[in-house]
Image (spheres, rainbow, N blue to C red):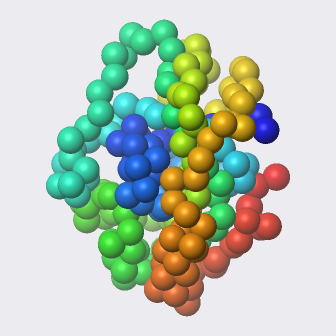
Amino acid sequence: MYLDQALKEWAVTVDALLGGKTVMLIRKGGIRDGRGHFTVKAQRVLLFPTYEHQRSPLLKPAFADLPTSNNSAETIPLAGWAEITHAVMIQAPAAVQRLDPWHIWNQTFVDQRLQWQPQRPLAVLLLRSHRLSTPVQIPQRPEYGGCRSWISLAESVDITASQPVLATDAYEAQVEEILGVIAHDGLVQTVADVGD
């Protein structure tokens, strides 16, 4: 199977997803995303690490040691991909606070996300991540830059040689627990409802 759609996320978050330390992303969308709120554009996406905007003071201490990159690098390393299995739209601060055990960000980050364009809900994504057997280097292109969530890559990446980070039972147990905590606060969409 090949993918050419990528989701940009802080490199530290990509590392946490591919290390099995989280299955959750909290998004509001990039400045260039438009449409008034975050939208899931594809169910299966490459995880595109970005070093823009990631800051230690917005992370829990266990994740504050940030990976670094050479900003002038001519290639981008892609180490894995994910299937977005659920999307939950949340606006209530109390609902977001109940998610604290499952994500890598601290309360300052959560508060900033809630306060930025407060009319927009937060999108909580649950992802089943897969690590590529061998990371792929793709050429850096100007169109991959900027504050956007989604990128259509100029080339497709073969994801056949990859393994899920978490066993099916372990992933499903986390998802069930998370959805049990927040289902009454948000609109829960399953994989059939997201993407193209």
Question: Does 190 sit above or below residue 142?
Answer: below
Give whichever of 185, 45 is nearer the camera: 45
Quadrant in the rendering for residue 149: top right
Q: Is residue 81 left or right of residue 105?
A: right
Residue 160, percent from left and from top: 72, 38
Give whichever of 49, 116 is nearer the camera: 49
Q: Is residue 94 left or right of residue 190?
A: left
- Whether residue 117 is visible: no
Residue 134, percent from left and from top: 55, 28
Quadrant in the rendering for residue 106: bottom left
On-image quarter of the N terminus: top right
Question: Does 140 sit above or below residue 45?
Answer: above
The structure residue drawn at horizontal position 55% and vertical position 63%, both measured from the top left corner, is 167
Residue 196, percent from left and from top: 82, 52
The structure residue drawn at horizontal position 62% and vertical position 41%, both measured from the top left corner, is 162
Q: Is residue 77 left or right of residue 110?
A: right
Quadrant in the rendering for residue 109: bottom left
The structure residue drawn at horizontal position 50% and vertical position 21%, both measured from the top left corner, is 76
Residue 132, percent from left and from top: 57, 37
- Whether residue 101 is visible: yes
